[in-house]
Image: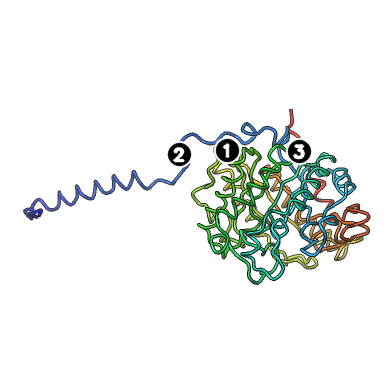
Amino acid sequence: MAISRRLPRRRAAPAIAAVLLAALTIAAVIVIPRAFVGPAPPPFSTVDPDYLDGNDYLRGVNVYSLIFAGGGVATADVGEPQTSYDFLSGRGVSIIRLAVPWQRLQTIPAGGTAADGLEQPIDTEYLDMVAEQVRRAGAAGIRTVIDLHNGCTYPWGAGEFVEGSLRCGDGISEQHVTTIWSTIAERFRDDGNVLAYDVFNEPRWSVGVDTYKRFAQVAVDAIRSTGDAHTVWIEGILSDTRGRLSAIAPDGPWIVDELGLVMYSEHFYADERGPFEPGIVAEQVFDRLREFGDWCERWGVRCSVGEVGWPSGGQGGVYSRESAEGWNAFFEQFYSIADEYSFDVTYFAASGSSDAGTLLAYVASVPGIPSTSGIDTALSQAEVIERHLTRPKSG
């Protein structure tokens, strides 16, 4: 047992001062903003020059036709014809983000549950169809980001909650994520038409920050376990502010990848989706974009805008030409900011399944599943998109 000893009163003040001085010295040492351990990561273009392929940034669109098809359409009828990709290429599109539903790669059996679906083998016929879409895009000179369009959830993907859905860490195990992503990577490992993988689309807040981060790492590990060296996109969590990368990762990127081929991505939409009215549309979308850009620059990582979209107008569009001009002027500013940060951007969206979804910029004159015309029509948003295409490096 240690025996305490009271110091004489005349020595107390110097002793206390010494303790305080030591405490302040320690605090000065330990209260330092966290940073990367070791040297700063090299510029992305020096790690993977094939990704940028001599450009400052890459631009394109989301192709959403596989999602529009849903679950009741024969695989043979799903996807875009070659003419769609030829048309997009002719408009200057150099990359697409192809939304692929997890629930079609592993289908819930009749009368079964989501848990039953995750135990099903990967549907190779459907994966073949995805590969054919990638091939067609490549034939048009377009590279593809394969986007598993589920928010760390199954079968719930985009849109409203699907009853009975499972979440990462709550019904979706690490093995489930390893299975789906190792299978995709095995198929596309050596495919030069694939630009990157986007491992989860708009992860849901209900998954939880720590759980999502862990499962994103699991997905990257699964991809790398196959020998696949494609770039990987990692998104923030779906929310206005609390799920943004600057909020969930204030200490910087968390994914560990021995190849260093990881990018971070966010999505941006105005809160309003109706006709444009001056003064109604809040400019906070610009603040969010700059906050994202500053986070990317601070931590020395390359980043992308996986989705951005606004309503069409005028001929073939949803609202008036006046509305289209207002929306276009607003998002012209958005694209200009994206240019400043050299973000890759894929506009949301293009599809031959519909002639005028509110946000669609490239559609079919004869929409359908399948579409007999394919994507062959540009709507009002294309004016902005095509002023901010992939930019080659100068000099």
Q: Nearer the viewer, residue 69 or 187?
A: 187
Mark 3 vs 2: CB contact within 8 A: no
Question: Which residue is located at x 72 percent, y 46 percent?
Answer: 145
Element at badge 2? loop
- Where is the N terminus found, in terms of image quarters? bottom left
Q: Nearer the viewer, mark 3 or mark 2?
A: 2
Instruction: Give the residue type at disc 1.
Output: Gly
Element at badge 1? loop
- Where is the C terminus found, in terms of image quarters? top right
Instruction: Give the residue type at disc 3.
Output: Arg
The percent coordinates of residue 311 (x first, y second) are 80, 62
Residue beneath label 2, please?
A: 37
Q: Nearer the viewer, mark 1 or mark 2?
A: 1
Q: Nearer the viewer, residue 336 or 391?
A: 391
Is there any visible trace of residue 332 in the rendered image?
A: no
Question: Which residue is located at x 33 percent, y 45 percent?
Answer: 28
- 347 relative position to 118: left or right: right
Q: Mark 1 Cα within 10 Å, few/some/many (few <14, many 20+)?
A: some
Q: CA distance from mark 1 to mark 2?
A: 14 Å
| Nearest to N terminus: mark 3 or mark 2 | 2
Residue beneath label 1, please?
A: 260
Q: CA distance from mark 3 to mark 2?
A: 33 Å
Question: Which residue is located at x 53 percent, y 60 percent?
Answer: 169
Residue beneath label 3, please?
A: 391
| Nearest to N terminus: mark 1 or mark 3 | 1
- 43 relative position to 382: left or right: left
Instruction: Give the residue type at disc 2.
Output: Val
Q: Nearer the viewer, residue 312 or 368?
A: 368
The percent coordinates of residue 129 (x first, y second) are 79, 50
| Nearest to N terminus: mark 1 or mark 2 | 2
Task: Residue 134: name its quadrant.
Answer: top right
